[in-house]
Amino acid sequence: MAARRRLDPQEARAAVAAVGDWLADGETARPERTVLAAAVRLSLRTLEQVAPGHTVEVRVPPFAAVQCVAGPRHTRGTPPNVVETDPRTWLELATGRLSWDDALAAGRVSASGGRADLSHWLPLF
């Protein structure tokens, strides 16, 4: 398998900034799919870099999933530590517009497993 190219932090920030107006209010139209996908994918890759490992799988369908957080590596079947959310919620978490605890309390994030708390690494930007 080819190594993934190193993430450019400026590219990630620019991708997330491109959806900033949409995140800031309920009036701005949803970004184009490619713009939204880039923001989600690059922000998840940022999480991979700041919390390296393979203990937690973070899923933001339909755009991406990554493994992160140091600890026991999961290799088969459904991972024991899974975080799943929608693109908007993920980007709100990544930018600090929404706290981890508030997202959990509102049911906007599904987090299972003892290591699935990402609050230590959020916000990313």
Image (tube, helix red, strand yellow):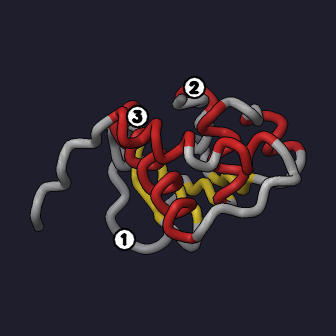
Question: How busy is the neighbourhood of tag 3: few (under 14 within 10 Å), some, or many (20 plus)?
Answer: some
Q: Residue at label 2? A: 120
Q: Which label number is shown at residue 51?
A: 3
Q: Nearer the viewer, residue 115 or 35?
A: 35
Q: Tell me, yes or no, whether the two marked residues, 2 and 3, touch with CB atoms within 8 Å.
A: yes
Q: Residue at label 1? A: 76
How far is the residue under mark 1 from the one under mark 3?
A: 21 Å
Residue at image position (53%, 31%) is 124
| Badge 3 amino acid | Ala
How far is the residue under mark 2 from the one under mark 3?
A: 9 Å
Residue at image position (46%, 36%) is 13
Q: Nearer the viewer, residue 4 or 116?
A: 4
| Label located before the other in sequence (1 or 3) | 3
Query: Residue lying farthest top?
Result: 120
SS at mark 1 in the image: loop
Depicted 16 relative to depicted 75: above or below: above
Q: Is residue 104 left or right of residue 71?
A: right
| Label located before the other in sequence (2 or 3) | 3
| Badge 1 amino acid | Arg
Q: Which label number is shown at residue 36?
A: none
Q: Quadrant of residue 59?
A: bottom right
SS at mark 2 in the image: helix
Depicted 73 relative to depicted 96: above or below: below
Residue at image position (46%, 58%) is 38
Q: Nearer the viewer, residue 30 or 41?
A: 30
SS at mark 3 in the image: loop
How far is the residue under mark 2 from the one under mark 1?
A: 26 Å
Quadrant the N terminus occupies: bottom left
The image shows residue 2 at horizontal and vertical percentages of 10, 63
The image shows residue 14 at horizontal and vertical percentages of 46, 40
| Badge 2 amino acid | His
